[in-house]
Amino acid sequence: MKNILHSVKRKLHAGKKIVWWVLAAVAAAAFIASGFALGFRSGEMFPQTIIVKELTNTFSGQPSAVNFGTFWQAWEAVNNNYLRADKIGAQNKVYGAISGLVESLKDPYSIFLSPNDNEKFQQDVQGNFGGIGAEIGVKKNQIVIVAPLKDTPASKAGLKPGDIILKVNSTSTDGMAVDEAVRMIRGPENTEVTLSILRDDWDQPKDFKITRGTITVPTLDFAMKDGEVAYVQLYSFNANAGYLFYEAASKAFSGGAKGMILDLRNNPGGYLEVAVDLGGWFLPKNTLIVKEESRDGNIEELRANGNGALADFPVVVLINGGSASAAEILAGALHDDRGIKLIGEKSFGKGTVQRLISLADGSTIKLTIAHWVLPNGKILENEGLDPDIEVKMTDEDFQNKRDPQLDKAMEIIKQEIANKS
């Protein structure tokens, strides 16, 4: 067991823009069922005549030069031989086939969501759902905790960014897709889920028995520290973040702040547009924040278009392994464009763009369509941001409620305030 665990660690060491665009509806079974006619034309290869009576719209969006004969043979084999075939509806088999199509991409962020799963996903986007309150992702083919959210069962149980989830209850996560892990972890309020967790400096996994709750995703906390430092902790780039940051900045100015600590630790991202808007507070107008580069080489540049009120304000940024996606984009832009220091630990490395494509029956495909490129040319995917000043948080620090990362940020921002004076 110990050798297996060390192997997992070696794999790790070796190494929403979540854009909510919705395209025009297309038939849910288009990519699979459209090959029906082609399967029939493959008589020489498959002399058996196969008649499928369970599906409609089989010609919608038919691809060319694709032979679906084997698919229809498999469909018939399931119908004729599977022990419980009478209990599996034809539409469920179509959903399974589409799910397999998307899984064949081997991309952890591209998933198929049935109408039921899509409804749960939309609840997550709105910010209220039942579960443990942790962002889940994939790192080096392992299901990991990206970020436990503030004041949730996950954070109260002691889960940390980078924790590897080996099992959910008694089910191994080996080879499991992110959406499947999320479905298993989520559940009604006041029910329990047990996660088998392996942490970087542990020799053996530990079980965390966590009682699920109704999760409300937090957005922002503000405080004035030592009378001159505005401390802004941003938990999510949701739709409320822009206005709440405006309120925090107003309090900072009226409170006589001379510098700011922007805390993006355990921030899993959110809407890219919000990150770009917030970048407009810290950067002069038209400053490049990030590029979106698609597979055909097309590049879209996203630039600051804000008031620039903090463009000359001393700022430092806190990051850790739970800083992902939009949080990494904002932190990377401030670092590249202004030389703002990053303090803490290496960020997660979520650097791809997903688009939601709605299908006709309420199901959805979330598909990776591009990656992010920072102003200095760095591609975030799988790389993450390295802090200028690395400060680790130990289990002892968490247990004793010490925060050496914030302490270092206070030290550095006070030096920068003094230098500016």
Image: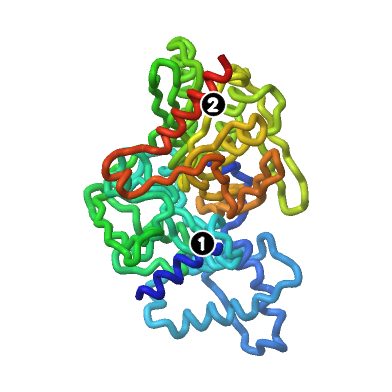
Q: Relative to 4, does residue 286 appear above or below in the rendering?
A: above
Q: CA distance from mark 1 to mark 2?
A: 31 Å
Q: Which mark is residue 315?
A: 2
Circles 1 and 2: CB atoms closer than 8 Å: no
Which labelled disc corresponds to residue 420?
none
- Circle 2 residues within 10 Å: few <14, some 14–19, many ≥20: many
Disc 2 is placed on an element classified as strand
Residue 38 shows in this picture: yes
**What residue is at 38 percent from the left and 19 percent from the top?**
226
The residue where tag 1 is placed is 13
The amino acid marked with disc number 2 is: Val
Element type where label 1 sits in the image: helix
Horizontal placement of 298 versus 272: left or right? right
| Occupied quadrant, residue 278 | top right
Residue depicted at 67% across the width and 41% down the height: 374
Find residue 166 and report its horizontal and vertical position in percent: 37, 65
Q: Earlier in the sequence, mark 1 or mark 2?
A: 1
Q: Does residue 356 appear in the picture of this structure? A: no
Image quadrant where residue 197 sits: bottom left
In this view of the protein, which residue sits in the foreground, 309 or 99? 309
| Colour convention | rainbow
Q: Is residue 159 above or below residue 416?
A: below
Residue beneath the point at 59% across and 52% down: 383
Rendering coords of residue 271 (x, y %): 54, 37
Query: Could you tell me which quadrant the N terminus lies in?
Result: bottom left
Estimate how packed mark 1 is, as few (under 14), some (14 to 19) or many (20 or more) residues with alpha carbons within 10 Å.
few
> Is 183 displayed left or right of 206 in the figure?
right
Tell me which amino acid carries mark 1.
Answer: His
Figure check: 126 above or below 410: below
Percent coordinates x, y for residue 60 in the rendering: 66, 60
